Structures are given as structure tokens and as C-alpha cells.
Image: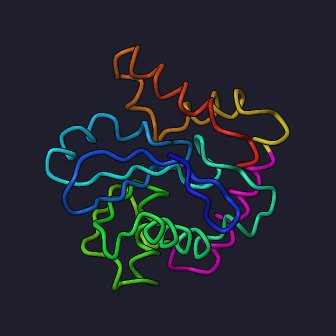
């Protein structure tokens, strides 16, 4: 389904019934990140997997302010409003976990529970935050300058994803294809 939020069309997949659970994927992911989990969750819950702005089938606006974490948290609330959901469980992985945490901090009355995987509230020291911003800007320049395929080659080779090399070939291919479908602007 497509839902317009503040001029940006979001893609979401929904299934099941019961209390709502919002699934927020990590960087380079999309709703497919959760495919191994959604059917089981949908037996008890109303599952809503969302392509976060700039990912998957959700639009990738050129306006960088639309990617601000607080703005993205407001977008999640607008999505809930559009779906007529007063309160939801949030499950976020990595970047999606940071987004879920931000939603919980800014809009605690809208969050029934919070589940985070490989997510943190951020870096403590200002110098570390500045270094991270610089690294992220360099990464963005690489993606825009060299393209999504070159970025994906690089991303798959970083130590964080070393264990993914042990996954069966079809799973690795599925993850790579998911990354390759992203828009470099996003």
C-alpha cells in the first residue's frame, strides 16, 4: 500500500489482525527484511512493515531535511494516523531501531512497547558524533558518485557483515538484491 505523508509516498505491507506492530528495517533494507517473521507475527498481530524514507518503494526526496531523524519519527506518527492506529508496538533493526527509539522518546503515548535489535541511542562524545557525521557524508558521496552497485560491493565487505558470508547463497543474493533496489538519493 502507498500512504502519502507530508508530500512523500511511503510503501507499507500490512497483514494480520490484532494489536499493531510496526516493523522498521535497517539501512539499505526494506519491508522484505522482515519476510522471515511477518507470517508468524500476523497470526496474532496486525503487522505493518514500512519502507523507511529513501528505501525500498518509499520515495527518496532530494530535500535532505526530510531525512532528519525527528522528521522521520513524525512521519511514523502520520503513518499511524493514516492507518487509524492510536498506539503500536515498534520493532526496529539498526537504523530502524534508532528511528523506533526516536519515536518512543518524542511520542511515548503512541508506543505500546519498544523492541530494538542492533540499535543504540547514539554516540556519547561530541567528537565521536562529528566523526560519524563525516563518515556518513563520505559514504553518501561515494553512493552518489560511484553508484549503488559499487556501494553495495563495499558495504557487503565491511567487517560488520562478515558473518553474512556464511549464509546460503540464495539468502546472500536476496539481501544483495534488496540493497541494489535502493535509490542512491535515499
Which residue is nearer to you in this view: 52 or 96?
A: 52
Q: Where, by quadrant of the figure, is residue 150 drawn?
A: top right
Q: Residue at x 49, y 65 (%)?
A: 79
Q: Which residues are magenta?
A: 123-141
Left-right relation of 99 to 8: left
Total labels: the figure holds 0
Q: Residue at x 70, y 40 (%)?
A: 183
Which residue is nearer to you in this view: 111 or 69?
A: 111
**Magenta segment main secondary structure:** helix
Q: Is residue 135 magenta?
A: yes
Q: Is residue 186 above or below residue 83?
A: above
Residue 26 x %, y %: 48, 50
Residue 50 x %, y %: 46, 51
Q: Residue at x 50, y 45 (%)?
A: 1
Which residue is nearer to you in this view: 142 or 87?
A: 87
Which residue is nearer to you in this view: 33 or 116?
A: 33
Q: Is residue 21 magenta?
A: no
Amino acid at each position: 500500500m502507498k500512504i502519502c505523508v507530508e508530500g512523500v509516498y511511503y510503501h507499507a505491507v500490512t497483514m494480520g489482525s490484532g494489536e499493531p506492530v510496526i516493523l522498521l528495517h535497517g539501512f539499505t533494507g526494506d519491508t522484505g527484511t522482515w519476510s522471515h517473521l511477518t507470517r508468524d507475527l500476523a497470526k496474532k498481530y496486525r503487522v505493518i512493515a514500512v519502507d523507511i524514507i529513501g528505501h525500498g518503494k518509499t520515495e527518496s526526496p532530494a530535500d535532505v531535511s526530510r531525512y532528519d531523524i525527528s522528521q522521520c519519527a513524525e512521519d511514523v506518527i502520520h503513518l499511524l494516523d493514516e492507518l487509524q492506529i492510536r498506539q503500536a508496538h515498534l520493532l526496529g533493526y539498526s537504523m530502524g531501531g534508532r528511528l523506533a527509539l526516536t519515536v518512543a522518546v518524542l511520542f511515548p503515548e503512541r508506543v505500546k512497547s519498544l523492541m530494538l535489535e542492533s540499535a543504540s541511542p547514539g554516540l556519547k562524545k561530541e567528537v565521536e558524533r562529528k566523526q560519524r557525521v563525516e563518515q556518513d557524508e563520505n559514504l553518501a558521496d561515494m553512493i552518489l558518485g560511484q553508484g549503488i552497485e559499487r556501494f553495495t560491493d563495499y558495504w557487503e565487505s565491511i567487517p560488520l557483515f562478515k558473518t553474512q558470508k556464511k549464509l546460503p547463497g540464495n539468502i546472500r543474493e536476496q539481501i544483495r538484491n534488496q540493497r541494489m533496489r535502493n535509490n542512491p538519493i535515499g
